[in-house]
Image: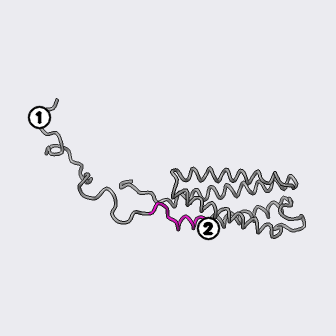
Amino acid sequence: MTDPRYNYGPADPQYPQHQGQPQYGQGQPPYPQGEPEPKVNVGKLWAGGIGTAVVAALLVVVAIMLIRGVLGIAILAPEGAGAYGSVSTTSYAIAAAGAALLATALLMVLLLAMPSPLTFFTWICLLLTAVAVILPFTLAADLDAKIATAAINLVVGLCITTMLSSVGSAAQNTPRQAGY
């Protein structure tokens, strides 16, 4: 039991006070005043999404040139079409860029509305990548062209997933605690 003649609380002059730290109800308010900072930095998110779209499109072009020119596998065009192929290569690159922009839109919605948005984003993108890898095997083509197309889809899907996961992490405006 404590002796009632002594006050062992904050009113006691010998009670240790925390120097330099504001107490609740004193000094600074616990929350910043003014407009709250938005949850997502939209400019940073879309800048990263556009960069990812450019990388995905260039990755498709490089992969097709490697597969057609170096490995000699005819994908997206007949064999005599050269290393670049035909307009199909350009269409494939534009489709990869479009997929990256759609993934950016999905990421923005998830960042604004979901708990653990990057986990959901990663799972959705990986499952869509799996569909893109399986899809060439359902079409009529040579086996080596199917494998090459599936490999390109895998690399582009992983590129979009990893780059946009990093962009999403950087675009989140999380409140920072003082002292950390």
Residue visible at 26% across and 52% down in the picture: 24
Disc with the residue nearer the chain's start (1 vs 2): 1
In percent of width and height, residue 53 lies at 65, 65
Q: Which residue is mark 1?
A: 4
> What's the colour scheme?
one colour
In percent of width and height, residue 133 lies at 75, 52
In percent of width and height, residue 56 lies at 68, 63
Amino acid identity at mark 1: Pro
Q: Secondary structure at mark 1?
A: loop
Q: Are marks 1 and 2 in contact (CB under 8 Å)?
A: no
In percent of width and height, residue 92 lies at 76, 64
Q: Which residue is mark 2?
A: 50
Q: Residues within 10 Å of mark 1 (few under 14, many from 20)?
A: few
Q: Which residues are magenta?
A: 38-51
Q: Is residue 158 above or below residue 82?
A: above
Verify whether residue 113 appears in magenta.
Answer: no
Is residue 123 shown left or right of residue 82?
left
Residue visible at 11% across and 34% down in the picture: 4
